[in-house]
Image (cartoon, rainbow, N blue to C red):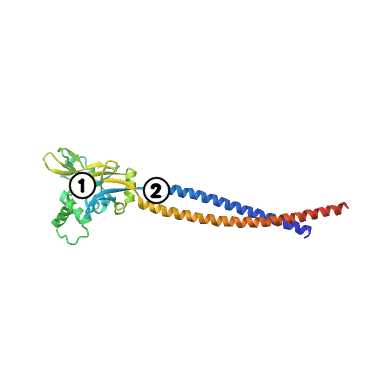
Amino acid sequence: MGMSASQARLLSLTARMHDMEYQAQEIQYAKLNLVDSKDAIYDEYLEALDSTKYQMAVLTPNGKEFQDITYTNMIMSNTGGVHSMYILTDMNSGRVMLPEQIASKLGPDPHDSSNYFKNKLGGEFPDVNTFLLTVAKNYLYSNRVDLNSDDDYINAMKKDGNFNYWQGVYDQIVGYDDENGLPIAGRGFCPISRENATDRGWLEKSINEAKVQIFKMTSKTNVEGKKINIFEESNLGTDSDLAEVSNDELIQQATVKYEKAIKDIDEKETKLDLRLSQIDTRHNAIKTEYESVKQIVSKNIDRSFKSFNA
């Protein structure tokens, strides 16, 4: 190999080695990114292991069970079991949340009137019987074709345990006399969408962010010896019928997701290691050739100097 050819070959081998070293460096950076991804996925997995959900106690023929809570579950009498009844209020306005199927059928909200007796006796808001029929026809039994008269609807509410609850809700909206005969101003109402009403995640988020307040129905005897249903403030910390439990379903999903993500990263790492090994093998081969060509160039230079000196 002549001097010019050897030098050209040497430059070519040098360029190839530098290119492979650059490729190896890129692979090392990619492996570091995978390590960071592993750490992030692990942190996300650890956070999921701490996830919880809210449930409420339900008495069934099999005994006491806990079921996930949604707004709908908390306000609907369950034919498959008995549970405490609740209302939710908007934390900012204090208004009672009503399903949009009901709220859209009611007249003006009486909440803005500060006079209790005007709320209860005047204005365009429906009386309690009209309110109960609105609830029955538009929400509780909107799909029941066997109910033909107003009495049928009211009797159905009494039979399934919804009558007293919704009567208590009405009192919360317009105002009522408490067990001591003292007038309590009405809260008014605001709608809750169908989607949010059945969304467990929405309710949990709203509770955690203090956007809703929970009130539990309690029966008391007033000064006249008559039972009345009122709602007292409640929360998960003090109410034995409400519980925060480990979200096993979400944890299982997180575990499957974590294991798959780690497997994918491990496969990528294996491929990167293989590429790095291939590059290293090629780099060593080129380096060997480089050293050989370098010696040839060095000998050619030595011969050239000797000829010149001669």
Residue at 62% across, 56% down: 279
* Occupied quadrant, residue 207: top left
Residue at 42% across, 47% down: 46
- The CA distance from mark 2 to mark 1 is 38 Å
x and y, in percent, of residue 147 in the image: 16, 60
Q: Which residue is mark 1?
A: 169
Of 240 and 113, nearer the camera is 240
Considering the numbered disc 1 on the image, is that residue within a helix, a strand or a loop? helix
**Residues marked 2 and 1 touching at CB (< 8 Å):** no
The residue at the far bottom in this view is 145
Q: Residues within 10 Å of mark 1 (few under 14, many from 20)?
A: many
Considering the numbered disc 2 on the image, is that residue within a helix, a strand or a loop? helix
x and y, in percent, of residue 222 in the image: 14, 40
Residue 215: mark: none
Left or right: residue 17 versus residue 147 is right
Q: Which residue type carries mark 2? A: Leu
Left or right: residue 117 versus residue 236 is left
Looking at the rendered image, the disc whose residue lies closer to the viewer, 2 or 1, is 2
Q: Which residue type carries mark 1? A: Val
x and y, in percent, of residue 138 in the image: 22, 56
x and y, in percent, of residue 284 in the image: 66, 55
Q: Residues within 10 Å of mark 2 (few under 14, many from 20)?
A: some
Quadrant of the image for the N terminus?
bottom right
Q: Which residue is mark 2?
A: 49
Is residue 248 among what the camera can see?
Answer: yes
Mark closest to the chain's N terminus, 2 or 1: 2
Of 141 and 23, nearer the camera is 23
